[in-house]
Image (cartoon, rainbow, N blue to C red):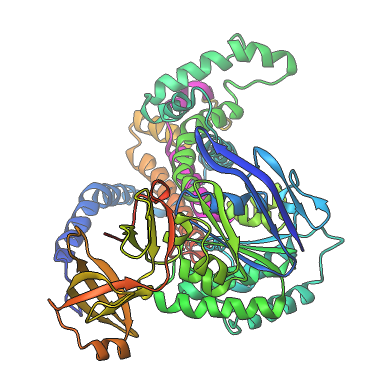
Amino acid sequence: MAASRRILPGFGLTLGVTVAWLGLIVLIPLAALVAKSTSLSWEQFWGTVTSERTLAAFGLSFGAAAVAALVNLVAGAVIAWALVRYRFPGRRLVDAVIDLPFALPTAVAGIALTTLYAPNGWIGALLEPLGIQVAFTRLGVVMALIFIGLPFVVRTVQPVLEEIPAEFEEAAASLGASRLTVVLRVLLPEALPALITGTTLAFARAVGEYGSVIFIAGNIQGQTEIAPLLIVIQLEQYNYAEATAIAVVMLVLSFALLLAVNLLQRWSNRRFREST
Amino acid sequence: MRIDIRSISKRFGSFTALDRVDLSIASGELVALLGPSGSGKTTLLRIIAGLEQADGGSLAFGDSDVTAADPRARGVGFVFQHYALFRHMTVAENVAFGLTVKPRDQRPSRADIRARALELLRLVQLDGFAHRFPHQLSGGQRQRVALARALAVEPRVLLLDEPFGALDAKVRVELRRWLRRLHDETGITSVFVTHDQEEALEVSDRVAVLNHGRLEQVGTPEQVYRHPASAFVHQFLGQVNVFHERGQDQAGADPARVALVRPHDVLVARAADPLCQIPAVVEAIAIAGPQVRLSVLPAGAKAAIEAHLTHDQYDQLALSRGDAVFIGYSRAKSYQASDLPTTVDYQI
């Protein structure tokens, strides 16, 4: 590493802190988790994580998180664009509102969403005649995950859009490109790495979300029961090892997905290491 | 393609960027828009490209009025000061961009587009760079890619905003000579913006000098340099010394008038003669490449004036610091003192 001496000292120090910190804060608790799950025999472990109820919970947690992340990708990109490109009254207010899902206790968000979307709530009452039920369904789960994930996309994409020089669009227009072509072939590729990062963050956050979902989901076994809730239920029944088994599978799946996205990120980033 | 700019005006809030500018550019001409920053030169270029809309006046390419035309439909190639190359595309993809975004029925085949891009890269002497990305190129190379990209759509008019502004001195000189040759080969009507008088004089067929949104003078490099129409043009195109006329060499000199003299028109002599009558002292001597730059302080003056001599003249005079000399000038142009720009180089 330090074959040639660097001008700034501190490589050893900062790497040491990084490793120690990651170990203490992230890796040791996760290792304890894995260790605890090994108190089950392989058959017991496999039985727990492949039971119908567990598989349904995994499917809902990852599926709803993916749908919510994709919705946030589109909505977040549009909102970031509007905030960056246009000056309208109340822009600062809108900008501040974006961060609310970060700060609001998720249980509060869950209760508020449930009240709104319940069949007798303000919005729920309007949707009911159309045959759409949000609260206590999988749609409700997705709604809650969209709510908590939105700021991740907006806040990641916004600074990147701000950095794109107006000259790119002018250059493309003077070469005859239509507005749509400019968006698709000039702006989107510039914002792509940030869009991937933001969507990944929103997805990761949604997979682990608990507080807001349990209120709106209704928690019907095998239908609207998310994996984190299943873990809590197992804990409440003193099935610690089963709870950790489910947690370990979530951990592995999440890690594999994040790693895949990281590789995707590297590929999309490959082309612009330096800016002009 | 002939360009007719008629009475174009543009304001940004309370700032007047252009004030009724009239300029006609002949087909195949290479014209420089020269002026200090804030003179409106870039605004005028952007109005020609359609990237900015004029508040008043009209603009025509050939016989067609394009005052309100969309920039996409104008057929202009625009080269930006910082190139604005698409970072995620290779050099070849950048050059081909204008062709690939044509409507399907006008778009050449993939093979034709590729051939055209490679041909343009050859023209700008970048064959072999097709697969590089912009960040892997030097400033001068990026500039040439930007030029090739603008030329790919076969524009009727080529517009360049400070094309050499971001390059180092040596590359600038090479690239501007190369641009001149390229223009002679392609013959495309071109307008470029610059704040560098040397660049404008060396490259262009005609120079349009702008100041505070007004056109001060339009003419060949020789006209604007040797026969400036205003004190501003005289001062902006090269260094000047200001001589307040004191009547030694002109009967009935007017104290409200001043004479502007370029350093190479200042005469220096050991003894007073009919042309050199102002006593002065040599303050500094600098051998600056091909010329010798003297700083001489006339008796009673607050600031020194600058004289540029050839090495032969300097050898004949055998000057050294502190020597007493007499100075005068061979060519001068007089202006109202009130028209004098506030920043002048040397003054007595």
Q: Foreground: A46 or B151?
A: B151
**Magenta stretch mostly in which secondary structure?**
helix
Q: Quadrant of the C terminus of chain B?
A: bottom left
Residue A175 at x, y percent in the picture: 69, 59
Visible in this render: residue B131?
A: yes
Q: How many numbered marks are there?
A: 0
Q: Which quarter of the picture shows residue B28?
A: bottom right
Q: Which quarter of the picture shows residue B299?
A: bottom left
Residue ranking furthest to the right: B105
Visible in this render: residue A221?
A: no
Q: In which quarter of the image is the N terminus of chain B?
A: bottom right
Residue ranking furthest to the top: A120
What residue lies at 52% left-to-right and 71% top-to-bottom?
B201
Residue B319 at x, y percent in the picture: 19, 84
Q: Foreground: A36 or A22?
A: A22
Q: In this view, does A26 lie to the left or right of A102?
A: left
Residue ranking furthest to the front: B251
Q: Give the range drawn in magenta.
A: A189-218
Q: Which quarter of the picture shows residue A95?
A: top left
What residue lies at 51% left-to-right and 64% top-to-bottom?
A267
Q: In this view, does B277 lie above or below B257?
A: below
Q: In this view, does B240 lie to the left or right of B145?
A: left
Q: Is residue B79 left or right of residue B77?
A: left
Q: Foreground: A103 or B229?
A: B229
Q: Is residue A29 left or right of residue A41?
A: left
Residue B230 at x, y percent in the picture: 49, 55
Q: Foreground: A185 or B327?
A: B327
Residue A107 at x, y percent in the picture: 40, 22
**Quick check: is A101 in the magenta stretch?**
no
**Quick check: is A206 in the magenta stretch?**
yes
What residue lies at 36% left-to-right and 43% top-to-bottom?
A244
